[in-house]
Image (cartoon, rainbow, N blue to C red):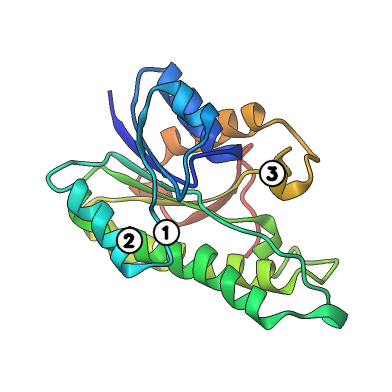
Amino acid sequence: MATYLITGANRGIGLEYCRQLQARGEDVIAVCRETSQDLDALGVKVESGVDITSDDSVAGLVKRLQGMTLDVLINNAGIIKRNTLGDLDFNNIRQQFEVNALGTLRITQALLNNLQSGSKVIIMTSRMGSIGDNTSGNSYGYRMSKAAVSMAGKSLSLDLQPQGIPVAILHPGMVKTRMTNFSGITPEESVKGLLQRIDELKLENTGTFWHAQGEVLPW
């Protein structure tokens, strides 16, 4: 049994991570700003009230987890606000950077003492953050913030490699969640593929940008 910490765990992909990991007998710590009935019903350990954009909030989580070893840290929390060139809202764009990029880096750095050689760090990003794959434009804040967190994941893979900690940068696919207006594949199908990528993660393939189904994606 391994210990997995998942951020953004109250719904969507995060909730499905919790569900599938619990079903296979793993120890799950579900981190979120607000819990949900579905999450509470799973019976996993819930750490609610955690805002990854707040130093104080993250510090409180770290204090509560002091002395606990995390085998896998899954940075799943994220937001999307669709901005077109003709309708740019810079406050929304800034908020997406705060959550998607800086929040992910903040909580990863804060939990480094809970990781050990053999632990894994997962960065949930998006194909929409790929520069090489951008053929439709728009969604400026989301694309830019996901490109930024992918770069953070790549740097983390290099900085954590000497400590024996591999990093995966994962795109879940187009998944039926509130974030995508419920278009695409089911969360169950997505997380099944994502967990396969996580299980196969090792130092030899650290820092790779993968689709949930195993395709290596362009930067």
Please name the amino acid that badge 2 sits on. Answer: Ser
Query: SS of the residue at dot 1?
Result: loop
Query: SS of the residue at dot 2?
Result: helix
How crowded pointer 2 is (Cα within 10 Å; few <14, some 14-19, many 20+) is rated as some
At a point 29% along the width and 58% down the height, the residue shown is 161
**Does any portion of residue 93 appear in the rendered image?**
yes
Q: Nearer the viewer, residue 25 or 32?
A: 32
CB under 8 Å between discs 1 and 2: yes
CB under 8 Å between discs 3 and 2: no
Left or right, 3 with respect to 74, comes to: left
Screen quadrant of the C terminus: bottom right
**Disc 3 or disc 2, which is closer to the eye?**
2
Please name the amino acid that badge 1 sits on. Answer: Asp
Residue 51: mark: 1
Alpha carbon separation for disc pair 1 and 2: 6 Å
Screen quadrant of the N terminus: top left
Please name the amino acid that badge 3 sits on. Answer: Gly
Looking at the rendered structure, the number of numbered marks drawn on it comes to 3
Q: Which residue matches tag 2?
A: 57
Alpha carbon separation for disc pair 3 and 1: 25 Å
At a point 52% along the width and 35% down the height, the residue shown is 36
Q: Nearer the viewer, residue 74 or 40?
A: 40
At a point 44% along the width and 65% down the height, the residue shown is 103
Query: SS of the residue at dot 3?
Result: loop
**Does any portion of residue 151 appear in the rendered image?**
no
Q: Which residue matches tag 3?
A: 173
Alpha carbon separation for disc pair 3 and 2: 30 Å
